Image (cartoon, rainbow, N blue to C red):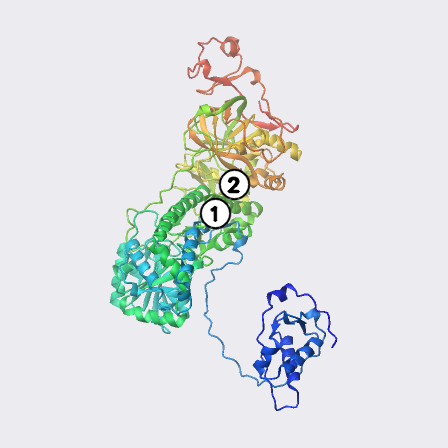
Amino acid sequence: MERRPIPAPSAAEGLRGYAAQVTVLLDRTVAETLALQIVAQIRTGIQDGRIAVGSRLPSSRRLADQLQVARNTVVRAYEQLHDDGLVSIRPAAGIFVLAPQARAALPPVPATRIETPMVERVRPRVPQRVQRLNDAQSSRLSFDFYPGRPAEALFPVKTWRRLMQSAVSGGLRRGMTRYGDPAGLSALRAAIANHLGAWRGIATDPGQVVIVSGAQEGLSIAARLFIAPETPVVVENPCYQGATFAFEAAGAAVHRVPVDEDGLITARLPDVGAALAYVTPGHQFPTGATLSMARRESLIAWARRRGTYIVEDDYDSDFQYDGSPLPPIAAMAPDCTIHVGTFSKSLGPGLRLGYLVVPPALADAAVAVKGLLDNGNSWFDQHVLAEFIRSGSFVSHLLRARGHYREARDTTVAALRRHFGDVDLAGTGAGLHICWQLPPGVPPAATLEAMARKARLGVYSLASAGAYDGLDTALARRGIILGYAAMAPRQIEQGIARLSDLVDDKLDGSPGFLSELLVSEPLSQVPRSEPAPRNRHKPALRAAPPARAVSAPNALSEDPMQIVRGIYRYPIKGMSAQPVNGIMLEAGRPFPFDRIFALARPNVPIDRYDPKWAKKGLFVMLMIDEALAEVRTELDPDSLVLRAWSQREAVFCADLRTDEGRRDLERFVRGLVPTLGDAPHLVQSRQGHFMDKPDNVISLINLATLRQLEELWGRPLDPLRFRANFYVDGLRPWQEFDLIGSDIRLGDAVFRVDRRNGRCGATNVNPQTGKRDMDIPGALRARFGHKDLGVYLVTQRGGKVVVGDPLAVPGPGGSAAPAESGAVLTPGPAPAGRFICRGCYYIHDGVAGAGVPFAELDAAWRCPDCGSEKSAFRPYVPAGFEPDGTGSNRRRG
């Protein structure tokens, strides 16, 4: 017989080259030969896909034994399949099913039997709602704040590998070849019982411990034990999705009891004989509240009166940061508590191991249900975990992880305060997540989540974080859950900063977005049933890290070429700048009299008499209301008299100390910005400011950087577009970015260069004309990949700074700036030989003192206003700038 060339096996054939089990049924009562029956049935199996391409068919001897026919019959059948191009025969290798492209086209095999039609099939009973914990898109996120996810880097890989190797060389064969106790490995149950006694104060017997596949299976076992259709069950609201969905799937009639900052409100417990009451007392999910001791006792008393079992989910209670943890309910009432624990938060959810601690009366029933579900967990994983706990490695891991997660918690809270002000947070004292009620000026949770996801940033509303709110509270609309455990501190800081910029960028590009920001709802719509405890406080955060450069003045190199060119303040947010000749600064305080007033938009949730910092969308601002630039204002810090000019003509004057003067200003601004609809409300900060950032930062612009941008873009830039407090000269272009993390000195004051300053749409408005004539954030992004220009400073040591004072920075070093290098400006001499007193800002104009130039004055000469010595004077550089059309900025006289 002619043999066809045998093609080389493909990669798929090599992977699937196992001996297939072929089902062939022979009928010896028909006229058709046995060989043809074998050919027909194998051909049908190949065409139907039941015999995979690349699989190896049984040898002729083995198939003959299987069918109880002569071997020659099978050989003839295989030869026929080979001739039809369905298989290839490889000597010493086997008989393989060919790939589709290697087969000859064959006619379809006629059906040999008629299928009996079925009536409508029984439909499966699928739960209405199922929790989805696996996000296939999460790997695409640059910063992911998904809650309850432990840090990968903390998993004890070396110890775990050693324990696994020990298990392999020990009782692996016996453990892997026998069924175990459905309740779990006895060594693991004993280790958990001992750990709970020492770590959580729960005195229990190993016989009361049942090993489960995570907390979710534990909840399902509790549901199977007690819930029949319409059985009353009490859950917290909001609640963990996995619990409420499991109870609903079992047919329970779910009663939702709201929570507040002290956990479940026991005064709202229903007057029914519920079978179960589900609570997360250690760190409530999602709010993070801790159930107070009084309410724990009240819940236990209610459960005993009603014959109810309390299902205590000990959710991430291994990590307590502030104070001592309260005793678990299982330690206070072991007779009526089913304690659910898991290793998903302490080690990782991939382990899929947890446990139940049940009252003695329920132990046998719980084990029976566990046996029906899966007959027990993997011996290997249980054995390794038992040794991990017994050896003390688990406690060591918890202590190490607690320190890491506390630092991550501190970083998250500090970053939120830094970018969003006095944030409303819950659950900071324990666990792996915090609950944040979004402040006014930030869109609703679902909108913010969608915006963030487009920017590869994962923040989560309650529903997306695995929580369920059945009462549709304000928290469901305005609550964000932030998990911080799996992220490094630097990632957390960058992620929160990006989230803040998202809101500003959206508002910058779409003014209509403003309507979504003017919303505020209280976190809880439920009145407290008792006074709040006196010891409630914000978490004690760690101090900020030290600077890269020491703060001592002698560590800074003074260069007479580097000077303070201008000093400005902006008394009313959004309105024009006011130059000052000098300023006295205090350590840790904001720039004096800067943005102490703001004009809140009509109907925004800002207390007129005790306003707090808020995102800028709540205020009248230059970014959207460019008409503000049509007037120049000046506010006297002593008298609070405000004057306004339009094209050098006085158009407004009012005393802001009086209610009438404030109302006059509100009406004046409404006339300037008719799109407001109604008059805004003038608010005054009592202690802080209304800058775009809530912390006490001071803004600085490097004029050399602006000059380089003027050359790059081919048009002049008015420095006042950037609304900075300090304008300095003599640095290299972009050198200010190299100084971040270092200390610098302006005059007598020392500052930490804290971070870059991201620019917004306000810089697009020309402060001279009030017109939007540029897109500076867009131009910066297009050229450099970011929208940063200038830096923020934090005052480390107070002192006086005067226009013309020297700027002292650390010595040369650091990377080049993200732009081409430019020439260093050399400031000229003081105009007309003028000098300024650093004590009172008196200006010697060159003719004072009977026409004697300043340099020729006697050394004993003193300032005529304050009496300061001649040595207290500096060359005077007038504050203010204006473009000269030559690609640089000249001083105003």
Classify residue 147 by image quadrant. Answer: bottom left
Which residue position is annotated with label 2? 621
Res. 155 visible in picture = no
**Furthest residue in direction front, as rendered:** 92
Res. 157 visible in picture = yes
Tell me residue 664's x, y (percent): 47, 38
Q: Callout 2: few (<14), some (14-19), or many (20+) C-alpha neighbours within 10 Å? A: many
Tell which of 133 and 101 is nearer to you.
101
SS class, disc 1: loop
Q: Callout 1: few (<14), some (14-19), or many (20+) C-alpha neighbours within 10 Å? A: many
**Residue 428's mark?**
none
Kind of residue indicated by mark 1:
Gly
SS class, disc 2: loop
Tell which of 622 and 387 is nearer to you.
387
- Of marks 1 and 2, which one's residue comes earlier in the chain? 1
Residue at 36% across, 57% down: 387
Tell me residue 267's x, y (percent): 29, 60
Tell me residue 171's x, y (percent): 39, 63
**Furthest residue in direction right, as rendered:** 2
Kind of residue indicated by mark 2:
Met
Which residue position is annotated with label 1? 441
